[in-house]
Amino acid sequence: MHLIIRKLMKNWLKILLALAVIGIIAAILVYVFVYNKPHKNIEKAKAEFTVNADSLFHQFQQNSEFYSQKYNGKVIEITGKISKTELTDSSAVAIFVFSQGLFGDEGIRCNMLPKYFPDARKLVTGQEVSIKGLCAGYNGTDVVLDECSFKTNF
């Protein structure tokens, strides 16, 4: 009886050791192929859509579910007249305002890449600009573009 229990314990130990090795290999593969995957350079990427800023905002406002599926995660180039900028030491946001809602301005918020902060500081209300960025979606009041760069020369 004692030998049977010992043999079963050895088999369980082998199974547990094999599962541990498989788990370690799986974790390494996830790290190499998923977590450590190089990120897309939005600044250098070709825009998948080119659209007027006003049109983009109103598309999301009319049917956010449909246009979220169309634009979210895609590189978009928008053109329009800038309404204002929000500047801090660590961020610059170019804003296109198209309406007023319960919580204030509604439109498109373009979170600029750090290298474009100086250009964002030069923006003037009403200036026509072209901005390219990654569409992060619509939050009910604003369409948000991340990792934005100016296509307009300053």
Image (cartoon, rainbow, N blue to C red):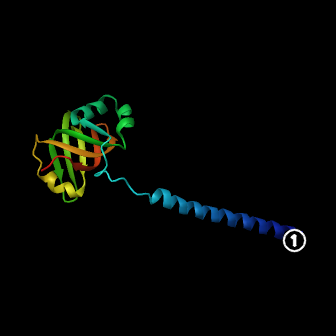
Split into 4 quadrants, where in the image is the N terminus? bottom right
Q: From the top left corner, tell me how far across and down residue 65 is, in percent.
A: 38, 33
- Residue depicted at 11% across the width and 51% down the height: 122
Kindly indicate the quadrant of the structure image that contains residue 10. bottom right
Q: Residue furthest right?
A: 1
Report the number of discs.
1
94 left or right of 126 in image: right
Say which residue label 1 marks.
3
Q: From the top left corner, tell me how far across and down residue 15 is, in percent.
A: 72, 63
Q: From the top left corner, tell me how far across and down residue 107 is, in percent.
A: 23, 38
Q: Camera-side residue: 84 or 49?
A: 49
38 left or right of 52 in image: right
Give the residue type that dot 1 points to: Leu
Q: From the top left corner, tell me how far across and down residue 39 is, in percent.
A: 38, 55
Can the viewer see residue 39?
A: yes
Residue 126 position (above or below residue 25): above
- SS of the residue under disc 1: helix
